[in-house]
Image (cartoon, grey):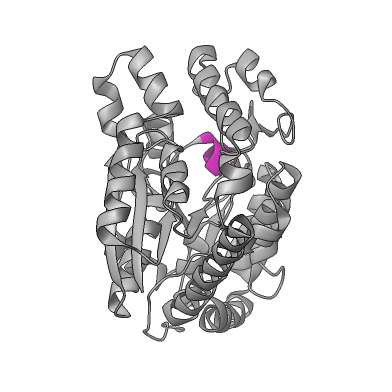
Amino acid sequence: MRVLLAHSYYQQHGGEDSVVEAELALLRDHGHEVETCFEHNNCMSELSPPQAARRTIWWSQGHAAMRKMVRAFKPDVVHVHNTFQALSPAVLQAVSAEGVPLVQTLHNFRLICPQAMLLRDGKVCEDCVGKLPWRGVVRGCYRGSVAQTAVLSGMLLVHRALGTYASEVDRFIALSEFSRRKLIEGGLPADRIAVKPNFFDWPESPVVEGRAGGLFIGRLSQEKGIGVLLAARREHGLSDVTVIGGGEAYEHEVAQAFGAAYMGFQPLDAVVARLRQASFLVLPSICYENFPRTIVEAYACGVPVLASRMGAMAELVDDGVTGLLFEPGDARDLAAKVAWAQAHPADMLAMGRRARAVYEQRYRPQVNMEALLAIYEQAREHRRLRQGRRDG
């Protein structure tokens, strides 16, 4: 197939960007011809606030450039990931105007929540789900800024009015059943949301002997539950857990609390090497999470996951089978589950083997490729039927 991939990179490279790169490589490895339309949000810092606002809501040059690219490349399908901020949803309108099947992966809840995570003041918030997002503006939910949240809400309202999401996208991809249900609650069309999880390419059989200790891997930020992990360490005796990740807000606190067990940011190869030695992964996020890629990485390495009982995490971790679930935000329960895992190494090894089996069944590259191509075909069929209705 001829596939055009579009994505706006975040200022700090994150899991979403890594997923896009992995999917690009996967398509090319399977012989598909892929062209890319990539922008980077760093360019937004060069614009004045009014210019940045206009580009976020409707980027005219990007709309024209996308139509030109589609005409030149003639793709079978256009697959869009993130449009915020640099691309803007105008590129979706451009693709649809050219009559090309359009797919968009929704890596977060941006289309139903200006802040994108359904999180406010450290707690889940669904006040804007299925409603006009004026509450988010009043509260300054995006980066604590009323002005920036107003721009985001304006983007959502403009494109809801234009039918960009409701009419122009042939297939949305949600990363989990939980995310799909939440997006439907937010007003997206249920019959056009498919579920396809992330994947991880790790063909080696996992090491099963000599594992010890736990790992936290991720951004040191509030939503990732680093505050819960710190409380479990300081107040409830959590031990033998290594922390990998960066983030200015909590870096000093984590370094003080964990000492030599804090490794800072590490490249993927180093992360995987540590995973292969670990007994379990700790995932204490206090937000819903769409699909933490670290779960797939852990499962691929035969590592069970200790996760918050919420959102997609409660769907992806089978309690007592591929890991353990604890109450969200409860540092005492987290510490208790870690202590149990440390006291039952044989059980953790058994969970790790089952986690690897789940990886083989659901999260291998080949399984993901088949699911992606099926979604592309669904999008093409939807576009054909839509075109037929127009012609009729």
Which x, y percent locates residue 255?
Answer: 37, 38
What secondary structure characterizes most of the magenta part? helix
Give the tally of numbered discs: 0
Q: Is residue 42 magenta?
A: no
Q: Is residue 287 left or right of residue 65?
A: right
Q: Is residue 39 left or right of residue 310?
A: left
| One can see residue 309 in this view | no
Q: Is residue 213 left or right of residue 349?
A: left
Which x, y percent locates residue 336?
Answer: 68, 55
Please state which of residues 60 and 219 is positioned toward the viewer in this rendering: 60
Q: Is residue 229 magenta?
A: yes
Q: In percent of the image, x 45 and y 47: which residue is there?
A: 97
Seen in the picture, residue 109 relative to 31 is either above or below; the reply is above
Which x, y percent locates residue 30?
Answer: 33, 80
Seen in the picture, residue 113 relative to 99 is either above or below; the reply is above
Magenta part of the protein: which range?
Answer: 222-230
Please state which of residues 222 and 255 is positioned toward the viewer in this rendering: 222
Q: Residue furthest front?
A: 392
| One can see residue 293 in this view | yes
Please state which of residues 159 and 124 is positioned toward the viewer in this rendering: 159
Q: Is residue 130 left or right of residue 221?
A: right
Which x, y percent locates residue 346?
Answer: 60, 81
Please state which of residues 328 and 372 is positioned toward the viewer in this rendering: 372
Quarter of the C terminus within the rendering? bottom right
Quarter of the N terminus within the rendering? bottom left
Q: In percent of the image, x 48 and y 64: which residue is there?
A: 213
Seen in the picture, residue 315 relative to 53 is either above or below; the reply is below
